Amino acid sequence: MTREEKCKALRGKIQAHRIKRLGWSEPVFRFILKGLQYHDHLRDMDLDELESLWKVISGYRRSGRPTEWEYDSAGRYIYKLQMAAGWNDAMLRTFLANTYHKTHINLLTEEERTEVRQLLEKITQPPIEEYKR
């Protein structure tokens, strides 16, 4: 495949992704291209620029769902506990990275999820008075 054919195929791939997956109109796409400091038109880009743009665009995930729906069912429960404990996503991800060397709840094993769930349940439970006199 020649360089020009690769460029044409990549332009088509980028256009299809921006329309089908991201739902960006042409003016929105051009605004984003300008913001990312690319040319206004895909035809003005060489192969290296198109590959770079494809990496950026394919890595972007548009989600109209709330944050908790990025998790599976067990992860959604941990997310609710996280919110009840007053932890934001950055705090939880920092904890996961430092403790388990993983960056997302969905990557944890069942044992690790159980540990995280138990920790968050402890944090969210009100303190128990040891002795009432």
Image: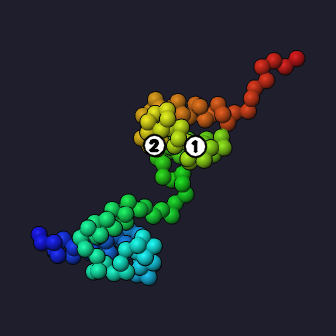
Residue 85 horizontal side relative to residue 65, left or right: right
Q: Which residue is mark 1?
A: 91
Residue at 23% over, 70% down? 47
Task: Determine the image quadrant of residue 31.
Answer: bottom left
Residue at 31% from the left image edge and 65% from the top image edge? 52
Q: Residue tagged by mark 2?
A: 103
**Amino acid on which disc 1 is placed:** Met
Type of colouring: rainbow
The amino acid beneath tag 2 is Thr
Q: Is residue 74 left or right of residue 14?
A: right
Q: Residue at x 43, y 61 (%)?
A: 61
Q: Earlier in the sequence, mark 1 or mark 2?
A: 1
Q: Gap between marks 1 and 2, in whole Å?
A: 11 Å
Image coordinates of residue 7 in percent, x first then y, are: 22, 73
Depth check, front residue: 86 or 69 = 86
Give percent across and percent down for residue 131.
81, 18
> Quarter of the image containing the N terminus?
bottom left
Q: Residue furthest right?
A: 133
Q: Residues within 10 Å of mark 2 (few under 14, many from 20)?
A: some
The answer to whether residue 20 is above or below residue 129 is below
Q: Quadrant of residue 123?
A: top right
Observer-nearest of 24 and 20: 24
Q: Residue at x 16, y 72 (%)?
A: 3
Question: What is the x, y in percent for residue 109?
Answer: 42, 34
* Disc on res. 60: none
Question: Which quadrant holds the C terminus?
Answer: top right
Q: Nearer the viewer, residue 30 or 34?
A: 34
For label 1, the SS is helix
Whether the residues at callouts 1 and 2 have beta carbons within 8 Å, the answer is: no
Task: Say above or below: 55 vs 80.
Answer: below
Residue 103 drawn at (x, y percent): 45, 43
